Amino acid sequence: MTQTAGEYKITLETVTYKPVAGKTKDHENLVNALINSFRYETDLIYITDRREAVNINNNPVRSIGGKLEKEPGAVSVMNNQSVNGINLLTIDTSYKSDFEEVKYSSVSGGFTDERWKQVMEGYSESGTLDSRDNFKYREYVKEGQSMHKITETTEITIKVNKDNINFYTHAHMPDGEYYIRVWMADINLASNNFTSINNAYNSLGTLKGIVPLDEIIITVKGSMHDDTN
């Protein structure tokens, strides 16, 4: 039996506001977290080139009473070694960005983008118009400041066994049901990877994974040794 190739695509788009236009760590860290959350899991029992029974992580499978035992394993980018020491996953990414300067005027009557007004006092956009009406108080952006809307998009392509290398299941794998499952693990947005750059999504807690993202159930009955041809 071969371990067939597969391909999974993820598109991540983030929008942030920064004083300087450019690639952000906010986006980069999320991309890396998504890549690292990918899992390829199975409880199939494989045979190596050295005739050893192993799981998908190339770890030995126990035999109890002459019967091989299931040892489920999961491959990830951080733990990529598979049968015969082959790296099972490969990653390709494509990145693009767009920058928009958020305009403002520092004088009364000039044009100021509503996105500035949403964070300043004395405007209906921020719900503080009473400050202007009742107290004649209104804030303006100081000359020389800058703010950019940064839209970043990364397309992630995760390839499983891109070269379609043959992995063979063990002839003595017991009869029964086995699975191949692809899933995405939870991402803790409050971890050090994210809090170190003080971004807005720290407070969102855990981004729930997807289990399963894809799954195949395999029924094993007999082996090639049962063939009579």
Image: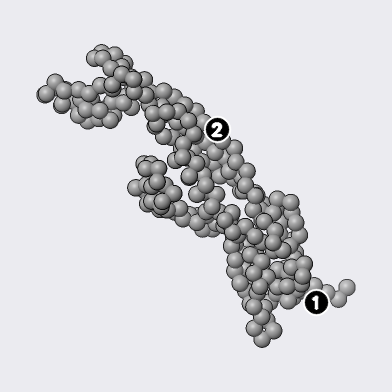
Q: Secondary structure at mark 2?
A: strand
Q: Secondary structure at mark 1?
A: helix
Residue drawn at the location 38% of the way across and 26% of the way down: 147
Q: Earlier in the sequence, mark 2 or mark 1?
A: 2
Q: Report the quarter where the N terminus lies.
A: bottom right
CB within 8 Å, label 2 to label 1: no
Residue drawn at the location 59% of the way across and 62% of the way down: 74
User: In the rendered image of this protein, does residue 199 appear above or below residue 62?
Assistant: above
Residue drawn at the location 34% of the way across and 23% of the way down: 145
Q: Is residue 164 at all visible to an observer of this figure? A: yes
Residue type, label 2: Lys
x then y, percent, for residue 63:
66, 80
**Which label is found at residue 135?**
none
In the image, taking residue 222 as reference, residue 187 lies left or right, namely: left
**Which label is found at residue 96?**
2
What's the coloring here?
one colour
User: In the rendered image of this protein, does residue 102 appear above or below residue 93?
Assistant: above
Please state which of the two labelled residues, at mark 2 or mark 1, is closer to the viewer.
Answer: 2
x then y, percent, for residue 141:
28, 22
Res. 180 image quadrant: bottom right
Total of numbered circles in the picture? 2
In the image, taking residue 3 as reference, residue 72 lies left or right, namely: left
From the viewer's side, name the closer residue of 163 and 147: 147
Q: Give the CA separation, mark 2 to mark 1.
A: 55 Å
Residue on which disc 1 sits: 226
